[in-house]
Amino acid sequence: MYWPEFISRDLSTRFPKIAFTNLASDGATLGDVFGAQLPELGDDDGHVLVTLTVGGNDLLSAFAGTPSTEVMERAVRDIIEAYRLVVQRIGEICPNALLVLTTVYDPTDGTGKLTGVLPGVAKVPLPHLDALNGAIRAMTAAGDSLALADVHRHFLGHGLTAKARDRWYWKHSIIEPSAEGASEIRRAWLDAIELVAARPA
């Protein structure tokens, strides 16, 4: 059995009546969240758990063609503002939701180098990735109904600087998590949820 440490440490065990709705899609951007995913979320005044993993594809798209620093700075500001609007809109749709915000991982482990790994992209714009992740961390600190799954920090050391067996990324596409990486995202989400549950009433 894979990852036996998660036996009984799951949402179905903790909340037997919980229902699951998957609105995620591969390659989604903030525009997809607004246009396709939020309309499917549905109004809900009850207790809802929402995990949000978005922003990385927007950043890579903005970086395509190696734009100027000024263009990238403007793009990351727009991405952060769109992210804030998504968080705000989820709060409006599901006012009693716990929203887990997920930082964007860095498969280069802080080196920024992707040459020969991802077609058309030679490096990751680390200052802009840091700006986005910093904004996500700041957002979670500002709201009681928000929790942080800091996947960026959790994944450091398990990317291109690690031996292949220690990587948490899919070998066919380094910007995608492997099965183990997906499990580690699960771990980050569960840790975030458990921290909220441990807060004093």
Image (tube, rainbow, N blue to C red):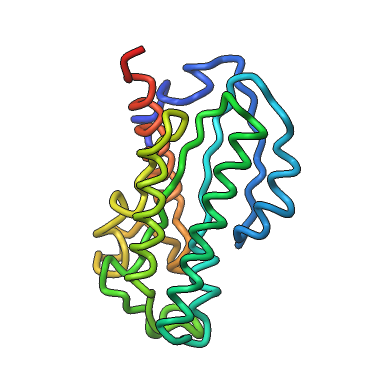
Q: Quadrant of the rendered structure where residue 104 is?
A: bottom left
Quick check: 57 left or right of 31? left
Quick check: 152 left or right of 63? left
Q: Is residue 1 visible?
A: no
Quick check: 92 left or right of 2? right
Q: Is residue 145 visible?
A: yes
Task: Find residue 17 and report its horizontal and vertical position in percent.
Answer: 61, 15
User: At 68% from the left edge and 52% from the top edge, which residue is drawn?
Assistant: 34
User: At 45% from the left edge and 77% from the top edge, which residue is drawn?
Assistant: 72
Q: Quadrant of the N terminus?
A: top left
Task: Find residue 160 and report its horizontal and vertical position in percent.
Answer: 30, 69
Q: Quadrant of the rendered structure where residue 82 is?
A: bottom right
Q: Nearer the viewer, residue 84 or 32?
A: 84
User: At 50% from the left edge and 24% from the top edge, which residue is drawn?
Assistant: 11
Against 169, residue 117 (above or below) is: below
Task: Find residue 118 and report its horizontal and vertical position in percent.
Answer: 46, 78
Q: Residue furthest top?
A: 201
User: At 51% from the left edge and 59% from the top edge, which residue is drawn?
Assistant: 55
Quick check: 43 left or right of 136? right
Against 120, residue 93 (above or below) is: above
Task: Find residue 78 and report its horizontal and vertical position in percent.
Answer: 53, 65
How many numbered marks, from 0 up? 0
Q: Quadrant of the C terminus?
A: top left
